[in-house]
Image: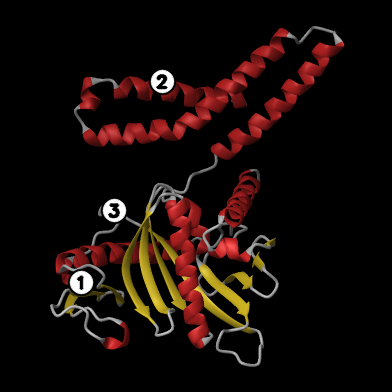
């Protein structure tokens, strides 16, 4: 089957879906509408590129036998456009991560470095909030353990927005900072670290939790230093006994809201656990160039004295640390996304 014949099947399927979505049978079934609409949306970029591809083939056929030097130059340009389109289409045809369009949970924990690590964890938290704001996404707090100087031993939050996982999934790992701490009198550069985990939000159908497998504890929400900020027991802690996973939420004012948030976060943690097991079992699977996202893996260094951020997975350095810390992550994320696509393309031709 030729490249064009393969693409024509996507166009045929697109037409079929449009017909289905206008049928009375599908219009009365919400699940089918959602399913077919999503498939049509996924196919649209491929079909649009294929139609451009067909137009170029048509133009090439019309000037194939002409000898004029200007026409030969036009023919050369059309062949270059055709080659470029083929590469773009190959990228679009790569298997898509089913989680890419999902909302996410992010966990940031201070690592080695004491209070300086906690301050860095807080700066990473603000960096991701600013990035989300730039893209028009919503940030929702789940739980936090702040320190007295404005840092965090741990902070957990969700980001709600289409494509959040596709953009931020490469942030999982150990982030290292090199700078002179504000508390350092001698001016020596210290190295500290914080870990980031990114989990896709999962639906109830993805992870089923048996009520008998969980224990729910209710307690009072606490502020910094243990001071009670809520005189009523509204905070929720859920323990999943088969795995030992514990999640908690105290950010909302009602016990019901905290329980719902904690339960959704538990589903995401269990989904991550199962995904990691599956990946470990398939040892022959390729490792993507951008890394596995393992939390113990040093993925990026933020060197403040040199105004440099280096992503070690792809060897990319940018020299605008203040802009990045204010949410300007696009160059780093685009680089990681491009490297991932290249690695997948190379794997697909082996």
Q: Residues within 10 Å of mark 3 (few under 14, many from 20)?
A: few
Residue picked out by circle 2 = 15
Q: Earlier in the sequence, mark 2 or mark 1?
A: 2
Residue sitting nearer the eye, 338 or 239: 338
The residue tagged 3 is 203
3D distance between C-alphas at marks 3 and 1: 19 Å
Front: mark 2 or 1: 2
Q: Residue at x 45, y 50 (%)?
A: 135
Please rate how many residues cluster around mark 1, counting C-alpha atoms within 10 Å: few if below 14, some from 14 to 19, many from 20: few
- Quadrant of the rendered image containing residue 42: top left
Report, in whole angstroms, how far the alpha carbon at label 2 lies from the one at label 1.
Answer: 47 Å
| Closer to the camera in the image, 349 or 323 | 323
* Residue shown at the point (33%, 32%) measured from the top left: 36
Mark closer to the chain start, 3 or 2: 2
Q: Secondary structure at mark 1?
A: helix
Measured as percent of width and height from the top left, residue 218 is found at 16, 77
Does residue 205 appear left or right of residue 275 in this picture? left
* Marks 3,1: beta carbons within 8 A: no
Label 3 – label 2 distance at C-alpha: 30 Å
Instruction: Say if 246 sits above or below 71 in the image.
Output: below
Instruction: Tell me which numbered mark, 3 or 1, is placed earlier along the sequence.
Output: 3
| Picture coordinates of residue 148, whole percent (x, y) | 40, 85
The one of 158 and 227 positioned closer to us in this rendering: 227
């Amino acid at each position: 089957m030729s490249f064009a014949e393969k693409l024509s099947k996507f166009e045929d399927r697109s037409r079929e879906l449009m017909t289905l979505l206008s049928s009375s049978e599908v219009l009365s079934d919400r699940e089918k509408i959602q399913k077919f609409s999503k498939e049509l949306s996924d196919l649209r970029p491929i079909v649009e590129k294929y139609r451009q591809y067909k137009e170029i083939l048509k133009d090439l056929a019309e000037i194939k036998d002409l000898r004029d030097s200007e026409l030969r130059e036009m023919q050369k340009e059309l062949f270059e456009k055709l080659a470029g389109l083929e590469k773009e289409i190959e990228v679009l045809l790569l298997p898509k991560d089913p989680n890419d369009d999902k909302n996410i949970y992010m966990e940031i924990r201070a690592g080695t470095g004491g209070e300086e690590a906690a301050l860095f964890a807080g700066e990473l938290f603000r960096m991701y909030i600013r990035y989300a704001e730039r893209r028009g996404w919503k940030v929702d707090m789940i739980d936090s353990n702040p320190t007295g100087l404005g840092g965090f031993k741990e902070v957990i939050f969700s980001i709600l927005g289409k494509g959040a996982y596709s953009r931020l999934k490469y942030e999982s790992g150990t982030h290292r900072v090199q700078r002179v701490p504000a508390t350092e009198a001698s001016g020596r550069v210290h190295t500290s670290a914080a870990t980031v985990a990114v989990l896709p939000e999962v639906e109830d159908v993805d992870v089923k939790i048996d009520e008998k497998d969980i224990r729910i504890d209710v307690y009072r929400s606490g502020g910094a230093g243990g001071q009670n900020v809520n005189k009523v027991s509204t905070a929720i802690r859920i323990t999943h006994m088969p795995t030992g996973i514990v999640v908690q939420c105290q950010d909302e004012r009602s016990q019901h809201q905290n329980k719902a948030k904690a339960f959704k976060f538990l589903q995401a943690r269990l989904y991550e656990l199962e995904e990691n097991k599956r990946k470990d079992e398939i040892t022959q699977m390729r490792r993507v160039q951008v890394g596995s996202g393992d939390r113990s893996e040093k993925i990026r260094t933020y060197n403040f004295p040199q105004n440099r951020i280096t992503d070690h997975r792809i060897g990319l350095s940018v020299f605008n640390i203040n802009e990045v810390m204010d949410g300007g992550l696009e160059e780093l994320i685009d680089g990681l996304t491009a490297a991932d696509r290249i690695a997948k393309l190379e794997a697909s031709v082996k």
